[in-house]
Structure formats: C-alpha cells, structure tokens
Image (spheres, grey):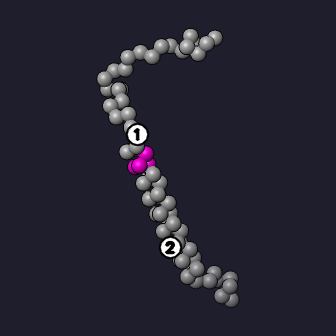
Amino acid sequence: MAADKHFHPPGPLPEGLRDREPDDMPAARWIILIVVGMVVAGAIVATVFSKRVQEAPAPIEQMR
C-alpha cells in the first residue's frame, strides 16, 4: 500500500497548535547552553571532590 493511502491526510491545526516561529534556533541555543553549563558544573564538582579525597585523613587501619 502506498504511503499516501496508508496515512490520513493532514487536517487543519487549531490556532493554538500552529507554529508561529518556524525557526527552532533559539531553543537549540538554550539547550546547548544548558548542556555546557552542566558540564562545567560537573567539572567543578569533580575537581573539588578529588581535592577533598586527596586531602582526607588516612583510614584508621593505616594509622596503626
């Protein structure tokens, strides 16, 4: 069966669902900024955590 016969023809969209801005670039930029921000925050947390692990006191077993 041909694809055009298999699917229903597109109907009119209600006014609330129409795409008024066909360009999604602003949303894509925000997503990229959020991902970069999360990577930077993760790097900061990893750096702080690794410094605290290096500066941590030795376990009791090693002190004996």
Residue drawn where x is 50% and y is 63% of the image: 42
Q: Is residue 18 left or right of residue 32?
A: left
Single out the residue that lies furthest toward the left: 15
- Indicate whether 28 appears above or below 52: above
Q: Secondary structure at mark 1?
A: loop
Q: Amino acid at mark 2?
A: Val
First to last magenta residue range: 27-31
The residue tagged 1 is: 24
Single out the residue that lies furthest toward the bottom: 64
Residue drawn where x is 53% and y is 68% of the image: 46
Category of crowding for the residue at label 2, using alpha-carbon neighbours closer than 10 angstroms: few (below 14), some (14–19), many (at least 20): few
Can you say which quadrant of the picture contains the N terminus? top right
**In the image, residue 28 lies in the stretch drawn in magenta:** yes
Q: Position of residue 24 (x, y in %)?
A: 40, 39
Label for residue 48?
2
- Indicate whether 7 appears above or below 37: above
Q: Position of residue 54 (x, y in %)?
A: 58, 80
Q: Position of residue 25 (x, y in %)?
A: 40, 43
Earlier in the chain: of badge 2 and badge 1, it is 1
